Image (spheres, grey):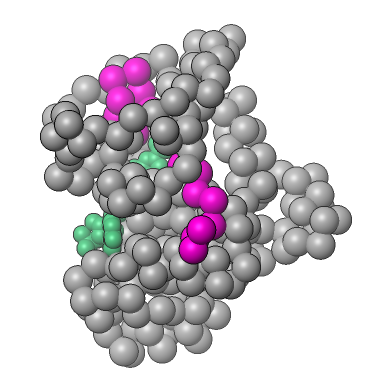
Amino acid sequence: MDRPFVFLNVAMSADGKIDSFERRGATLSSARDKDRVDRLRASADAVMVGGRTLLDEDPRLTVKSADLRAERQARGLPPNPVKVGIVSRADLRPDSEFLNSGPARVLLFTTAQTLAAQVEILQACGAEVFLLGKRRVDLVAALSMLKELGLERLMVEGGATLNFELLRMGLVDEITVYLAPLVLGGENAPTLAGGPGLVRFDALPLSLVSAEAWDDGGVLLHYQIS
Ligand SMILES: NC(=O)c1ccc[n+]([C@@H]2O[C@H](COP(=O)([O-])OP(=O)(O)OC[C@H]3O[C@@H](n4cnc5c(N)ncnc54)[C@H](OP(=O)(O)O)[C@@H]3O)[C@@H](O)[C@H]2O)c1
């Protein structure tokens, strides 16, 4: 396989939304789920997010637990996985958390829409910047580059548009969903997979690996792509 093993994780309301209509990065995970996500992140070689999540929410994407970071280092790994952004126009601020929280290697896959001067700013902040496409990032090329860099396990942390595109292109191996006991509604609230959508015939079949009911009222679902 010319790409890493790719697993996608989301926290989702019972009605399938991964944020409210306000799109401010609503917290849907319980405390227990946050710990699970931290462990999952600590198990990854790289963690990827899409452009809107990156620019609007400026995630740190670091491993929160000092014990988990120490465990990684004991295994000869860097304390945090490599951070990967898929962003058409990489207008990140030099003081952003994404670029600065760490220590962590930062890779930005972007397009010709990012101005050369901005690329220089990002590089001066220590990010490695790759131009892969004119309007949108070529995801196959991005994943193959991650594999070339020796990154074997890629965790994808949204958002909806990136999730859809990776799923549509057959680039995802597993999905974990924390289904929070909440209803958010909202026609424009993002869901696990956004984008233009698929007709029923093309719907992606999943195999349920496990379903756990948690005492915080949530359900943890683990799927493999069939
Ligand atoms: N609950 C959760 O687990 C969770 C996790 C993460 C995010 N979220 C939520 O998800 C929402 C953001 O999702 P989103 O769908 O708006 O954006 P997104 O998936 O974070 O980012 C998508 C954007 O990335 C850029 N991009 C460049 N190349 C691409 C490619 N090949 N495929 C896909 N995207 C590409 C595009 O920007 P251009 O349109 O500029 O070209 C695209 O619109 C937020 O509300 C956030 O809170 C929830």
> Does residue 7 belong to the magenta stretch?
yes
Q: Is residue 203 left or right of residue 76?
A: left
Q: Residue at x 51, y 27 (%)?
A: 222
Which of the 4 quarters of the picture holds residue 80? bottom right
Q: Is residue 79 left or right of residue 139?
A: right
Q: Would you place residue 176 above or below residue 45 in this image?
A: above
Between 161 and 149, the one lying in front of the other is 149
Q: Residue at x 62, y 68 (%)?
A: 150
Q: Residue at x 49, y 63 (%)?
A: 2
Quadrant containing the C terminus in the rendered view: top left
Between 190 and 124, the one lying in front of the other is 190
Q: Would you place residue 210 above or below residue 150 in this image?
A: above
Which of the 4 quarters of the picture holds residue 194? top left
> Does residue 14 belong to the magenta stretch?
yes
Q: Which residues are magenta?
A: 1-21
Q: Would you place residue 64 above or below residue 21 in this image?
A: below
Whole-percent x, y for residue 38 in the image: 62, 41
Specify whether residue 13 is in view: yes
Whole-percent x, y for residue 78 in the image: 72, 63
Whole-percent x, y for residue 83 in the image: 53, 62
Specify whether residue 57 is in view: no
Whole-percent x, y for residue 142 in the image: 41, 68
Q: Residue at x 60, y 58 (%)?
A: 152
